[in-house]
Amino acid sequence: MLKRTKIKSLLSSENPIDSVILKGWVKTKRDSKDFSFLEINDGSCLKNIQVIANNSLNNYNEIKKLTTGSSVCVKGALVESKGGKQKFEVVAESVEIYGIAPDDYPLQKKGMSDEFLRSIAHLRPRTNKYGAAFRVRSRLSYAVHNFFQSRGFYYVHTPLITASDCEGAGEMFQVTTLDLKNPPKLPNGEIDYSKDFFGKEARLTVSGQLNGEMYSCALGDIYTFGPTFRAENSNTQRHAAEFWMIEPEMAFADIYDDMDLAEDFVRYLVKDIMENCADDLDLFEKFVDPTLKETLSNIVDNSFARITYTEALEIMKKSSHKFEYQPEYGIDLQTEHERFLAETYFKRPVIVRDYPKEIKAFYMRLNDDGKTVAAMDVLVPRIGELIGGSEREERYDLLVKRIKELGMDVNNYSWYLDSRKYGTVNHAGFGLGFERMMMLVTGIANIRDTIPFPRTPKSIGF
Ligand code: 4AD
Ligand code: MG
């Protein structure tokens, strides 16, 4: 029995084909005297295929009632198109109607706003732009695995539910099965978590790093690629409460190996998308960011700038740029500072390293100056921070000291400390925010438009 062929394959066929089946949704319909033209899309690619339905078809009266968004199955012949725009079109022998989309189908006109489309996130992948975005997202995921697998990194699945706060920022969602209206209490009035599902407080992970490190100290080079959660109450264009992160970790590696890997990785991903999603990128360049391809070529063709945090502050203090938040040694870099460095000053990605230890997480390796840690962030034009990483503190005593200094409970980290107790090795890794990478390669300005069903403060529809 003949199966359906995807429109992407039909449009790239070498030759006409006598008999094909295609299935999809009607984008537009035009009627002339003796026939109707249907533009059909099935999501396999950006382009539609044109179907010619003659009035001799027995259900022609029904075909004439087809609306935008209706679903159909077309059998017919793939023939060379006389019209010009496209190489092939299909002359229908039959058009079976699966489902009509009534007049209230929301995707009628062109140029709907991103805000409106967010309110119909369940339908937006049927638009050209969001179809393109989510095809790119799929390819980008594939490229992530290709990059690491081809370099001998092993893919590790780290847990999503955890009892440790990796980043120590306290921005975690709690996971509990206790009755919130009537939780069990200890004599001192506090909640008795020994009665909770896990017997202690549990949260959704902000990062798979701590677990990933254990596997790098066994398998060598590993990476994670999974969802992470942050209860940061920041309503910005680049923060989501649920986002995907890729976290490679390398044993026997230092901060310089880490920066090299980060740079190679970003460049590889950009190049892969330019090579494999050309049609979709054309759309983004036309409708989203006219400088997109220039920005991407610039990333592929040039090495990243590399400076220390101290140098970054000197550059900003010397510049005449007006910052809302004054750059002073010791501050955590704000988005405006990150963008100034990448976009305005270097005009390309820049890696900043050696941050003051006070503004970074407990696990980062203390530098010889005793003040800074071997941390590195990759900052890119338009977005700012794309990657955060570091060499890890592999010296047992220093790590314990830091955990205590920060008022964290050493007992919670005994398993983590074992990696330093038994055959410790230097190691380094980073986390790349997958949606921020999506923003970079598509030019899409709002993170909510790079993930199928975004989760942000006060927003959990769909
Ligand atoms: O810099 P972060 O917090 O680093 C870590 O979590 C480390 N444990 C990574 C590691 O060394 N293995 O987060 C890493 C990246 C950021 O650079 C950013 O791209 C992204 O994750 N990110 C977010 N993306 C979207 N929404 C948020 N709320 C994000 N928070 C961080
Ligand atoms: Mg960071």
Image (cartoon, helix red, strand yellow):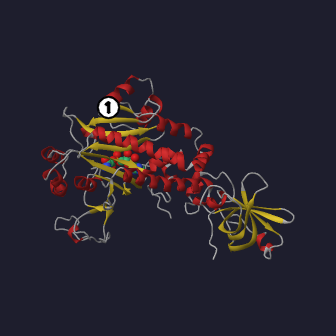
Q: Which quadrant holds the N terminus?
A: bottom right
Disc 1: which residue: 308
Beta carbon of the mark 1 residue lies under 8 A of ligand 2: no
Position of residue 438 measured from the top left corner of the image (x, y, whole percent): 48, 49
Residue drawn at 33 percent across, 39 percent down: 259
Q: Residue furthest right?
A: 33
40 relative to 132, above or below: below
Position of residue 162 measured from the top left corner of the image (x, y, whole percent): 28, 61
Residue 118's image quarter?
bottom right
Position of residue 193 measured from the top left corner of the image (x, y, whole percent): 22, 67
Q: Is 425 placed left or right of 172 in the picture? A: left
Q: Is 309 placed left or right of 7 in the picture? A: left
Q: Is 332 placed left or right of 421 in the picture? A: right
Instruction: Identify the element where label 1 is drawn.
Output: strand
Residue 47, can we see it?
yes
Residue drawn at 43 percent across, 51 percent down: 434
Residue 236 or residue 43, whichever sits in front: 43
Neighbour tally class for label 1: few under 14, some 14-19, many 20 plus, Cα within 10 Å: some
323 relative to 52, above or below: above
Residue drawn at 25 percent across, 63 percent down: 201
Q: Mark 1 belongs to which amino acid?
A: Thr
Residue 105's image quarter?
bottom right
Residue 64 or residue 199, whichever sits in front: 64
Residue 3 or residue 62, whichever sits in front: 3
Residue 340's image quarter?
top left
Q: Is 224 placed left or right of 411 in the picture? A: right
**Count of numbered circles in the view:** 1
Position of residue 56 measured from the top left corner of the image (x, y, whole percent): 83, 72
Residue 236, can we see it?
no
Residue drawn at 32 percent across, 69 percent down: 180
